[in-house]
Amino acid sequence: MLSYGANSLVFNLNLVLTELNVKWGEFIRSLVNTLGDFSLFVGDTLVGMRRFWRRRDLFLKQCEFIGVNSLGVTLVASIFMGSVLGYQLYVSFHLFNAEALLGGSVGVSLFRELAPVMGAIMVTGRAGAAMAAEIASMRVSEQIDALEVMGIDPIEYLVVPRVLAGLVMMPLLAFCFAVVGSLAAAAISCGMMGLDWTIFWHQYERVTDRIDLIHCVTKGAAFGLILTWIGCYCGYEAHGGARAVGGATRNTVVASCLSILLGDYVLTSLLPFGFSRLRI
């Protein structure tokens, strides 16, 4: 009986391990196929940009949709983020009698990290998911096939204007996020917590420089490309009816947010760090 039980346990364990190996193999193969298809999609988009000027009217419409229409939600998020940042940093620095460092810390953290990352996540939730659902609906209803029948390149018509609009508008949204967030942080730390306005803005101006602006603009442009490319790809590759529209939207939000965080780490390690004048 003991030998039979041991053999059964070993058999079940081998079966479980085999199933895990099969699932991991399928996952890796699916991931590699998806990355390959996405790379080809990006290449087709770059080729389509050569005829960008023919679709300039669509580009301007997408600039309005991605940039102007996303400005409201981005600024509201920046007010909340700046307010929380000003409050938390004041409480933390007050423990060490270092409230004078608050202005520079707010400027650096907003321009380098919070503004481009949080702004891109807000735009992903609003514009990225919307463009994925729109393109997926066109794919499911065979409107993209109709474009191909009429001799219109769907990549040039649907994807290129959106990608270029994200590249142009996302840095502007990130900059606006940083500026409004800085004002909100100053209002909380100085207006409510009692920090002197002159000390805040003097330290803000002393520490925040062009390196921080480079981080903000570069990351904003990169994240704009990421969220629009992923949104268009998920919508373009949607198949299977109405359920595919929801799947494309879900995949866009998840993949874009993770890619933005990964891209933030990569860009932070590659961009110049600055702070040379603060070395002791």
Image (cartoon, rainbow, N blue to C red):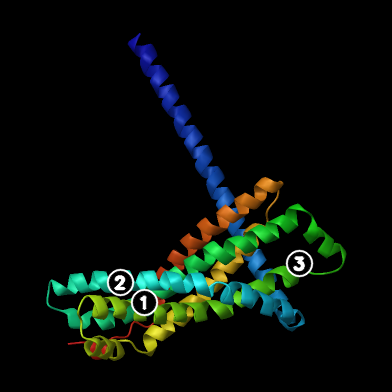
Say which label, 2 or 3, has the lower sequence index: 2
Residue hosting label 1: 110
Q: Hey, which residue is sitting farthest front in the picture?
A: 192
- The percent coordinates of residue 254 (x first, y second) are 51, 56
Q: Is residue 144 above or below residue 241?
A: below
Characterize the local packing of mark 1: few (<14), some (14-19) or many (20 or more) Cα atoms within 10 angstroms.
many
Residue found 38% across the figure and 86% down from its top: 211
Residue found 12% across the figure and 77% down from its top: 97
* Whole-number angstrom distance, CA of label 1 to CA of label 3: 38 Å
Query: Of helix, strand and loop, which one carries label 1?
Result: helix
Viewport quadrant of the C terminus: bottom left
For residue 119, say whether it is visible: yes
Residue hosting label 3: 154
Q: Which mark is residue 85?
A: 2
Query: How many marks overall?
Result: 3
Q: Which mark is residue 213?
A: none
Q: Looking at the image, is mark 1 or mark 2 nearer the viewer?
A: 2
Characterize the local packing of mark 3: few (<14), some (14-19) or many (20 or more) Cα atoms within 10 angstroms.
some
- The percent coordinates of residue 185 (x first, y second) are 31, 77
Q: Is residue 40 above or below residue 271?
A: above
Residue found 35% across the figure and 77% down from its top: 184
Viewport quadrant of the N terminus: top left
Instruction: Tell me the amino acid under the disc marked 2.
Output: Leu
Query: Of helix, strand and loop, which one carries label 3?
Result: helix
Say which label, 1 or 2, has the lower sequence index: 2
Instruction: Tell me the amino acid under the disc marked 3.
Output: Pro
